[in-house]
Amino acid sequence: MGQTKKRNYDRYTLAYKQQAVRLSEHPGVTCRAIAQALDIHEVMLYRWRMESRKGELKENIHMKPAPSSPKRRKSRGDPAQAKEDELIAAQKRIKALEKQLAQRTEELDLIKKAQRFFEKQKR
């Protein structure tokens, strides 16, 4: 079993959270639409809304500030950075597809073994 990688969590300022909550409270606007527009999970937005109602919405001061993850980082006119981000995303996709292919291959092998077993049982 391999080691797990440390996840890079995004951190949001209090002002950002408050602005997201204000946007989600507009009539005729769904939380899902706001969450997609802000590129956050809608459950996070619901949690921020609940914390805002309770008066518990605050900034994560105990966490060290960290640069945003490459997924959320926008390259500002730097074509080399944009290509690097694109390459990283492609590598992640390839890795996920290889994992999925290995899982499907394993499933097929198992089905073939089960088929041979049941054929022997019928005889």
Image: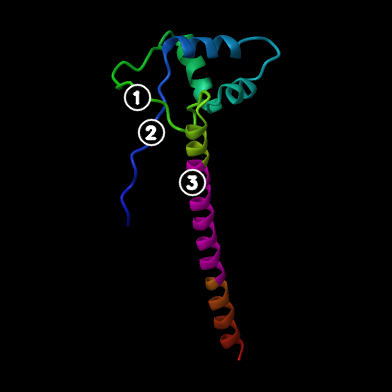
- Residue marked by disc 1: 66
User: Where 21 sits versus 93, above or below?
Assistant: above
Question: Which residue is depicted at the point 38% across and 14% down?
Answer: 59
Labels 1 and 2 touching (C-beta < 8 A): yes
* The quarter of the displayed image where residue 28 is located: top right
SS category of the residue bearing label 2: loop
Amino acid type, callout 2: Asn
Looking at the image, is mark 1 or mark 3 earlier in the sequence?
1
- Residue marked by disc 2: 8
Q: Which residue range is magenta in the image?
A: 87-108
The quadrant of the image that shows the N terminus is: bottom left
Return the x and y of residue 122 as percentages of the image width and height: 61, 87
Amino acid type, callout 3: Lys
Could you tell me how far apart the alpha carbons at marks 2 and 3 are, in whole angstroms?
15 Å
Question: Which residue is depicted at the point 59% across and 78% down?
Answer: 115
Q: Nearer the viewer, residue 61 or 90?
A: 90
SS category of the residue bearing label 1: loop
Magenta span main SS: helix
- Residue marked by disc 3: 92
Looking at the image, is mark 1 or mark 2 earlier in the sequence?
2
Looking at the image, is mark 2 or mark 3 earlier in the sequence?
2
Amino acid type, callout 1: Ala
